[in-house]
Image (spheres, rainbow, N blue to C red):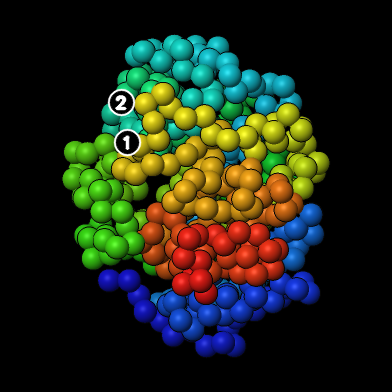
């Protein structure tokens, strides 16, 4: 069962700019009322850091405190960070979202994939949610075996007709595509480190370096698959039932390699060292907020063009057969590696220009260009919501509703406070 820990108020640290006190209040309440073990939240507004909070225990078992430089695995919140590398290639004119993937990666055309566009692939419409060939951790860091398995995969549906969450595969497809476009042939982890993290001084990694001090990395306190059934009101019932069936598309989307099926395995050093750009990003929460904050404020430091930002801000293009997610089993919206706001998941300002990704257990980060805001939150006790974890949405609602005067972040936002 998920660990229960009492966190004293003396272990909550950081600060906020004038006027952002409601976010700090909500952060403290998460520890007092919502069983937070360890967490951090950061916000950049118009390029300026206005919220930087951290606290609790980086390891709830040993009671080691969460420090200012504690890094945390963020699961699928990694997807949005990884997709910023692809957006940078688009800004440099090296990649066209509407070009066929096979124009950059000829082998990709196998098994009925010749006409899939980069936009369809990044928007979870390609039907490539599984890899049928069994994978091992040693295969994941840009190996020829992985590239072959990806190229030979047959889509689960006609690309462009439906969409479904590419839970682990999206990052590997992005990585191979990046390596084909980048003149130096770098895969996504190395490209991100050199071209995104270094210029912005981000302490965030897709494939944790071997020399990282282990005492800086938060321990994830996860759940087992069977526990999902005890939280059916939080986890969508159709998804929870499908995930419990190992033969379903929903389960197979997260089960190769098998080590990824258990959330706590993200604590293993070999899993953290592998390159899994959809799943295993590890770093400072303020670094994620800084990245999104730069994008929200115009992308000047990263080098994003207005054309690329306009693409990221634009509404998602709906698959021809509707919004029913074939993996998550409810309506969703995706665009260019990001989740876009939709009725069941309202984030950012009311215009819908926001873009970001949520991670298993409750983490979430996004850019809201209308307010120039980059937001990031991550924790080490995994919850059971696909989005709108009560801890995260309390912080987001405090920021957007109470501070910025924007819309409540969900229909019952008052209940999250």
Above or below residue 348? Residue 65 is below
Residue drawn at point x = 54 percent, y = 34 percent: 316
Quarter-of-image position of residue 139: top left
Q: Which residue is drawn at 43% across and 77% down?
A: 35
Residue marked by disc 2: 156
Residue 326: image tag: 1
Instruction: Tell which tag, 1 or 2, sits nearer the viewer.
Output: 1
Q: Residue at x 57, y 47 (%)?
A: 356
Q: What residue sits 23% from the left and 45% below the top?
A: 242
350 horizontally vs 364: left or right: right
- Residue 135, relative to residue 92: is it above or below? below
Question: Residue 46 placed where, x, y %?
Answer: 79, 54
The residue nearer to you, when weighing 183 against 286, is 286
Residue 266, quarter of the rendered image:
bottom left
Mark 1 vs mark 2: which is more N-terminal? 2
Q: Do the residues labelled 1 and 2 touch (CB within 8 Å)?
A: yes
Q: Is mark 2 on a helix, strand or loop?
A: loop
Q: Position of residue 368 (x, y in %)?
A: 66, 50
Q: Is residue 417 visible?
A: yes
- Locate residue 83, reporting x and y percent: 58, 38
Element marked by disc 1: loop
Residue 167 occupies quadrant: top left
Q: How far apart are marks 1 and 2 (CA)?
A: 10 Å
């Amino acid at each position: 069962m998920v660990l229960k820990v009492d966190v004293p108020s003396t272990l909550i640290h950081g600060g906020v700019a004038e006027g952002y006190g409601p976010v700090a209040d909500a952060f403290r309440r998460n520890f007092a009322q919502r069983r937070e073990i360890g967490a951090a939240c950061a916000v950049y507004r118009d390029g300026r850091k206005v919220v930087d909070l951290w606290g609790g225990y980086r390891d709830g078992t040993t009671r080691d405190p969460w420090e200012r430089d504690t890094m945390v695995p963020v699961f699928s919140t990694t997807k949005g960070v990884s997709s910023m590398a692809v957006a940078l290639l688009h800004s440099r004119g090296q990649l066209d979202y509407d070009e066929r993937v096979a124009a950059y990666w000829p082998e990709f055309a196998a098994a009925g994939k010749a006409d899939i566009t980069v936009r369809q692939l990044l928007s979870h419409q390609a039907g490539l949610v599984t890899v049928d060939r069994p994978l091992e951790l040693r295969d994941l860091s840009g190996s020829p075996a992985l590239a072959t398995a990806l190229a030979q995969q047959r889509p689960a549906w006609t690309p462009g007709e439906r969409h479904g969450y590419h839970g682990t595969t999206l990052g590997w497809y992005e990585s191979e595509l990046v390596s084909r476009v980048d003149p130096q042939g770098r895969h996504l982890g190395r490209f991100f480190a050199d071209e995104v993290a270094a210029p912005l001084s981000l302490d965030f990694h897709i494939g944790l370096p071997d020399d990282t001090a282990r005492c800086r990395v938060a321990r994830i306190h996860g759940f087992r698959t069977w526990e999902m059934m005890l939280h059916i009101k939080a986890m969508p019932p159709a998804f929870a039932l499908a995930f419990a069936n190992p033969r379903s598309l929903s389960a197979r989307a997260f089960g190769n390699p098998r080590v990824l099926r258990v959330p706590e395995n993200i604590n293993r050093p070999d899993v953290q060292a592998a390159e899994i750009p959809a799943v295993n990003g590890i770093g400072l929460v303020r670094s994620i907020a800084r990245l999104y904050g730069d994008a929200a404020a115009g992308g000047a430091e990263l080098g994003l063009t207005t054309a690329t930002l306009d693409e990221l801000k634009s509404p998602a293009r709906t698959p021809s057969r509707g919004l029913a997610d074939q993996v998550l089993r409810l309506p969703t919206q995706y665009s260019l590696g990001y989740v876009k706001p939709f009725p069941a998941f309202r984030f950012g300002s009311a215009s819908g220009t926001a873009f970001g990704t949520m991670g298993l257990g409750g983490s979430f980060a996004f850019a809201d260009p209308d307010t120039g805001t980059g937001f990031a939150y991550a924790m080490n006790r995994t919850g059971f919501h696909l989005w709108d974890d009560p801890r995260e949405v309390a912080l987001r609602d405090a920021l957007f509703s109470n501070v910025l005067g924007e819309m409540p972040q969900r229909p019952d936002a008052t209940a999250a406070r």
